[in-house]
C-alpha cells in the first residue's frame, strides 16, 4: 500500500488549526498529506482520498470522467426519484421508521449505482446482504475512532472484503469487462456510468491491481452511503428543530427545494462527516499558525473552523439556513475539504451552490435534497415515545437510532 506510517516518531504534539483562514492555508500546502485514515488502511489503503501528488492527479482525472454534470442530472432527475419512492413507500404505509436505517438504505441504493456494484436479483435480501458489508467497510474507514479491539476488527473487515468481492464485486467486474470487450470489437453497447466502469476503462493507464480496485469501490460504496446518510439524519434533525421555532416555515420546507438545500448546507457546515481533518508533513512546512517538521501532524478542528465567528458571524455555532455569507465562502464551510482533495461527490450529494442567476429548472439541488424533501412531505416528526440515541460504538458524533413518525399526526399525538 502507498500509505505508510512515518518512519520516525513525532517530534512534537500535532499542530491544531481552528480558524477558517488557517485551514485554507493547510489545504493549499502540497507537502501536507492526508493522514486521517491511516489506521483504516484495510479499507482505505491507496483509495482516492489517500493518494497524493501524481498518483492522486491521475486517479482523480480518470474518475472525474464519471463525476460530470450530465451524469449528476440523470441521477437526480431520472434514477433517484424512483429509488426514493420505492424505498420510502413501505415506511409511509407503516407510519414510522428509524431515520438512521432509512438513510443508509436510501443512500446505499445511490452509492451502489455510482460505485458500480450490481444487484442482479433486486431482492430485499440481496440489498440487506450488501448493507451488512457496507457497515463493515464503514467500521474499517473509521477505525481510528473505534472503541473496540482494532486488530480483531481489521481481521474481520479484511475477511468481509474478500467475501464481498466474491459476492458482488467480481460479478460486477466480469459484466463490465464483457461490455468493454464488445465495445472494443465495434458493437454499439451502452456502458454503465459508474466508477467501476471508469476504472476498468483506464486500467492500464492507472496501473491498478485488483486489490486496489477492491478497496476503491468499497470506499465509494461506504462514502456515498455513510457520509451522506449521516448528513441525511442530521439535516432532518436540524430542520425539525427549526420548524419548532419557526412554524411559519413548515410549508416552505415541504415545497421549496432551494430552502431545503440551504438547510442541508448549514447542517453540513455545523456537522462535518468527520469532526477533524488530519495531515502529515512530507517535508518542513511553514504555516502562519506555526512551523511543521517532516513527519509532524496537523489537525484541522473542523467543528471550530466551520464555526469561526470571523467568517460566519456571532451566531456561527447556531443553525440558521438564512445566514448571510461573505463573498467566496461556501455555505457548508470546509466540510467537503479543500484544495486537491475537495470531495469528488460533493455536487452529486449536496448539489451546486446557487448563484445570482439561479434557475430552478437547470439547478442541481443534490440527491440529499430530494431524499429529505420526500421525507418532509411524508409528514416526518419525532416519535415522542422513542427519543433518538447517539451511537455508543464510535467517538464520532453519530446518531445510533432516530425513530420518527410519518403521515398525518393523530389528534391526541404529543407535539
Image (cartoon, grey):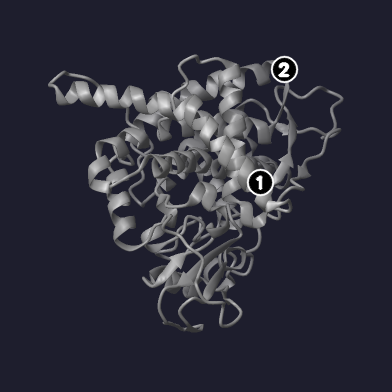
Q: Residue at x 16, y 26 (%)?
A: 184
Residue 230 coordinates in the image, percent (x, y): 61, 43
Q: Residue 235 in the image: x percent, y percent?
A: 61, 44
The image shows residue 8, relative to residue 231, as above or below, that is below
How far separated are the C-alphas under marks 1 and 2?
Answer: 36 Å
Nearer mark to the viewer, of 1 and 2: 1
The image shows residue 316, relative to residue 321, as above or below, that is below
Residue 78, horizontal then vertical, whole percent: 39, 24
State yes or no: discs 1 and 2 in contact (Cβ < 8 Å). no
**Is 377 placed left or right of 193 in the picture?**
right
Instruction: Identify the secondary structure beneath mark 2.
Output: helix
Q: Picture quarter containing residue 95?
A: top right
Q: Where is residue 332 drawn, in percent x and y?
A: 51, 55
In front: 40, or 105? 40
In this view, the residue in front, 314 or 290, is 290
Decide if residue 30 is in sight here.
Answer: yes
Quadrant of image for the N terminus: bottom left
Residue occupied by mark 1 = 153
Q: Earlier in the sequence, mark 1 or mark 2?
A: 2
Count every numbered label the image shows and give the total: 2
Label 1 neighbour load within 10 Å: few <14, some 14-19, many 20+:
some
Helix, strand or loop at mark 1: helix
Front residue (pair 132, 353): 132
Which residue matches tag 2?
94
Residue 97, relative to residue 319: is it above or below?
Answer: above
Residue 307, by quadrant, is: bottom right
In the image, is 10 to the left or to the right of 384?
A: left
Callout 2 crowding tier (Cα within 10 Å): few <14, some 14–19, many ≥20? few
Q: Which residue is drawn at 33% across and 37% down?
A: 362
Q: Residue at the location (68% across, 34% down)? A: 99
Q: In the image, which disc is placed on residue 279?
A: none
Amino acid at each position: 500500500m502507498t500509505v505508510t506510517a512515518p518512519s520516525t516518531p513525532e517530534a512534537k504534539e500535532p499542530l491544531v488549526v481552528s480558524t477558517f483562514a488557517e485551514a485554507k492555508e493547510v489545504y493549499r500546502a502540497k507537502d501536507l498529506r492526508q493522514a486521517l485514515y491511516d489506521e483504516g488502511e484495510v479499507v482505505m489503503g491507496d483509495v482516492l482520498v489517500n493518494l497524493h501528488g501524481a498518483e492522486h492527479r491521475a486517479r482523480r482525472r480518470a474518475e472525474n470522467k464519471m463525476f460530470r454534470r450530465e451524469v449528476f442530472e440523470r441521477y437526480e432527475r431520472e434514477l433517484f426519484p424512483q429509488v426514493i419512492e420505492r424505498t420510502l413507500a413501505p415506511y409511509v404505509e407503516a407510519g414510522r421508521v428509524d431515520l438512521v436505517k432509512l438513510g443508509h438504505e436510501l443512500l446505499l441504493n445511490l452509492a451502489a449505482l455510482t460505485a458500480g456494484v450490481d444487484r442482479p436479483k433486486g431482492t430485499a435480501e440481496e440489498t440487506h446482504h450488501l448493507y451488512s458489508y457496507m457497515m463493515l467497510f464503514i467500521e474499517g474507514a473509521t477505525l481510528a475512532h473505534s472503541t473496540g479491539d482494532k486488530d480483531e476488527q481489521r481481521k474481520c473487515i479484511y475477511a468481509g472484503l474478500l467475501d464481498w468481492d466474491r459476492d458482488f464485486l467480481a460479478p460486477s467486474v466480469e459484466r463490465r469487462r464483457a461490455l468493454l470487450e464488445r465495445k472494443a470489437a465495434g458493437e454499439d453497447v451502452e456502458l454503465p456510468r459508474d466508477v467501476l466502469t471508469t476504472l476498468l476503462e483506464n486500467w492500464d493507464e492507472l496501473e491498478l491491481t485488483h486489490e486496489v480496485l477492491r478497496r476503491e469501490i468499497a470506499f465509494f460504496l461506504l462514502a456515498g452511503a455513510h457520509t451522506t446518510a449521516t448528513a441525511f439524519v442530521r439535516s432532518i434533525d436540524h430542520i425539525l428543530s427549526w420548524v419548532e421555532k419557526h412554524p411559519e416555515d413548515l410549508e416552505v420546507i415541504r415545497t421549496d427545494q432551494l430552502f431545503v438545500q440551504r438547510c442541508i448546507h448549514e447542517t453540513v457546515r455545523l456537522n462535518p462527516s468527520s469532526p477533524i481533518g488530519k495531515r502529515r508533513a512530507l517535508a518542513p512546512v511553514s504555516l502562519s499558525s506555526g512551523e511543521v517538521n517532516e513527519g509532524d501532524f496537523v489537525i484541522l478542528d473542523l467543528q471550530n473552523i466551520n464555526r469561526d465567528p470571523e467568517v460566519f458571524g456571532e451566531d456561527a455555532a447556531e443553525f440558521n439556513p438564512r445566514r448571510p455569507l461573505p463573498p467566496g465562502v461556501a455555505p457548508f464551510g470546509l466540510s467537503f475539504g479543500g484544495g486537491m482533495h475537495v470531495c469528488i461527490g460533493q455536487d452529486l450529494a449536496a448539489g451546486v451552490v446557487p448563484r445570482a442567476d439561479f434557475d430552478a429548472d437547470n439547478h442541481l439541488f443534490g440527491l440529499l435534497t430530494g431524499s429529505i424533501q420526500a421525507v418532509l412531505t411524508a409528514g416526518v416528526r419525532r416519535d415522542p415515545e422513542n427519543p433518538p440515541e447517539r451511537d455508543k460504538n464510535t467517538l464520532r458524533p453519530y446518531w445510533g437510532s432516530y425513530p420518527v413518525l410519518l403521515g398525518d399526526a393523530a389528534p391526541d399525538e404529543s407535539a
